[in-house]
Image (spheres, rainbow, N blue to C red):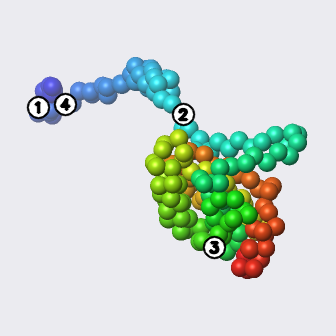
Amino acid sequence: MATLNESQSGKAVKGRTKKATPKVDLTAMVDLMFLLTTFFMLTTTLGQLNAADIAKPDKTLPDVIEKYPESRTMTIVLGKDNKAVSYMGTIEKANMKVVLVADLQKEIKSNELLVAAAHQNNPAKYMIVIIKPGKTAKFQNFVDVIDEMKIANIKSYAIDDDHITEKEITFMEKNNF
């Protein structure tokens, strides 16, 4: 509100009263911030690692090679240049073929259909895949094959980097990978 004051000259002059600037107390806001931070820290879950669980046999045990059922076993041997060797059954009767790692999904699906047809679609007779990374294989190809196992929903697969046979090595050398 303005008041009228009379100056020395006798004229009325409007005067101003000083207004106090409002002060904001942020104590309650800081308390609320800490309460919300505590609440969200306690109620959220931390990110889960996306690592694949791989169980390998104990190296201290004697070298025991398990026999896999020939009619439902697929073997993939990884080589260089993003190529792999694929075959069904045992190495003695193997009809090996070279497959690009990018095309392994088609190969897995077709072999899975063959196994299902051979066993009258019995769910207990699922396909088993043995993955053998060769000395010249890239780690990325190995990861891609493991991803393909997850995508194709393969129930049983094994990584065997210790038992690459002479026939597999010879086939890889003959095909220049």
Residue depth check, mark 2 versus mark 4: number of the one nearer the observer: 2
Q: Residue 46 carries which label?
A: 2
- The amino acid type, in three-letter code, at marker 2 is Leu
- The amino acid type, in three-letter code, at marker 3 is Val
Choose the circle earlier in sequence order: 2 or 1.
1
Quadrant position of the N terminus in the picture: top left
Which residue occupies the foreground of this view, 135 or 45?
Answer: 135
Give residue 23's quadrant in the image. Answer: top left
Residue 117 picture location, percent across and down: 47, 55
Instruction: Residue 6: tell me if it is visible.
Output: no
- 75 with respect to 147 (left or right): right
Which structural element holds mark 2? loop
Choose the circle earlier in sequence order: 3 or 1.
1
Q: Which mark is residue 12?
A: 1
Measured Cα–Cα span from mark 3 to mark 4 = 98 Å
**What residue is rendered at 75% in x and 68% in y?**
168
Residue hosting label 4: 15
Measured Cα–Cα span from mark 3 to mark 2 = 43 Å
Residue 66 picture location, percent across and down: 75, 46
**What residue is rendered at 72% in x and 62% in y?**
91
Which residue occupies the foreground of this view, 31 or 55?
Answer: 55
